[in-house]
Amino acid sequence: MLYDQHVDRVYRLAFRLAGEDELARDFTQETFIRAFQRLKDFRSESSFGTWIHTIAMSVSLNGLRKVKKFRTRESSLDDALTVGIVTRRAEPDLKERLRQAIDNLPEGYRTVFVMHDVEGYTHEEIGEALGVQPGTSKAQLFRARARLREALADFAGEWVS
Amino acid sequence: MSDEDRMDALLRQMAAEEYNRPPEIVPREQMWEAVRQGLGTGDKGLGGNEEQGTVLPFRRRVPRWVYYAVAAALLLALGIQLGRLIGPSPAAQEAVVPKGSQLDSLGRVSPDSVPLVAPRSDLARSDDGGKGPPKPKGGPERQLGPDAPDDIRARAYTVATAQHLTEAEAMLTAFKGDLSQGRMDAEISAWGKDLLSNTRLLLDSPAARDPVRRRLLQDLELVLVQIVQLSPKSSARDRDLIKGALTDDRVLTRLRTAIPVKGT
């Protein structure tokens, strides 16, 4: 069955991008609903897996933009309420710094990094899912890695030793 | 292997292990149930003709020309309103007042006295393959086009409902995110109040004459009431109840299937 064949991979990717079970479920469900509604538009020139990943990326990225937009507005309000309050935070550890660095990547870099380096998609698969050339995917990944190295430069000594 | 390559490899490994790591068990069954309900297939299963489902993509129900017609109707209404302000003659006024409606003290048509025309629930069938809206039939009364404004009004309600549902979907998505993190934001509550009053207005309008849409608006209203009443002091049970209402009634999924799909 098409659903069983692809649901795990779509959910995993949605979770990696969203970081929350609720959102990952919503994105996965929405992906399959749209796919089944448009099933007759599917052309067998590409595989069903490729096609459904195209829908999944569109649903996930649009959904995340909506959530981000709202949370940005929310956090700016929080910032306004806490003006003048000095908070002292502990230095985050490497895992937390890595998470922040990936979260802070531009959307395109982050998406390609997560798909390729975290979930193991090929540049061809990424290109088809995002509607870009494989070369663009490679370039985005190269830049994403450079940004991460730069963001985590102070840990470099520990890593390469 | 250079230092950069070593660092990249370590980064990759650490990201794969730590970054937004998904759970080992994928909630396949729950998601499948939601997908099936979202498609309106119930127990009939999938793979059949799409037309069998109760949910049709919005764009197929409302063709592009309807948007132009609504814009034209709004422009026309503005022109009529301006004309009335300038001061029409009583004879001209009589000609535009629908039968059975009454004028108020300022000479305007009382909205309560104007008979509402039910929106056409069979909008999909009313599409005539892009040939345009149905043409008014002949006859002296038809020359004022009593059918055309009513038809357009019904479609205007459809467009307004779609916009409302889109906003409700964005709000509930944000709310669900907060709920899963145990947060409660006052701004969401204010947003919910706005949506709640609009939902009530739509429920009292011809937009709610379509039974499927009415059920969706009623469920949405229930969820919004619960969200609006939620406060930071509310118990975990209150939050669970809202979560249950969102999940059990599949409000969010139904909203998403009822709103237009961008780029299709």
Image (cartoon, coloured by chain):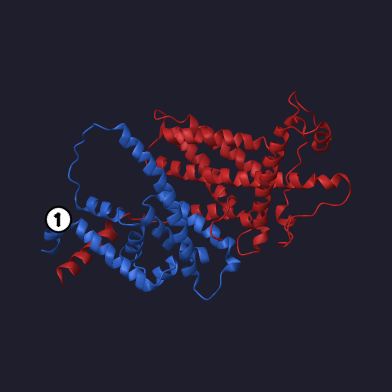
Chain colours: A blue, B red
Residue underneath mark 1? A154
Q: Toward the viewer: B8 or A36?
A: B8
Q: Is residue B12 left or right of residue B261?
A: left
Q: Toward the viewer: A106 or B221?
A: A106
Percent across and percent down for residue A24 are 42, 53
Question: Vertically, is A17 above or below B151?
Answer: below
The residue carrying pointer 1 sits among few (fewer than 14), some (14 to 19) or many (20 or more) residues within 10 Å by Cα, namely few
Answer whether residue B161 is visible to the viewer in this image.
yes
Q: Toward the viewer: A115 or B61?
A: B61
Q: Is residue B2 left or right of residue B218?
A: left
Q: Toward the viewer: B78 or B169?
A: B78
Tell me the residue at 43%/65% (across/down): A130
SS label for mark 1:
helix
Percent across and percent down for residue B238 are 46, 32
Question: Vertically, is B99 above or below A22?
Answer: above
Q: Chain of mark 1?
A: A
Give the residue type that dot 1 points to. Asp
Question: Vertically, is B182 above or below B73?
Answer: above
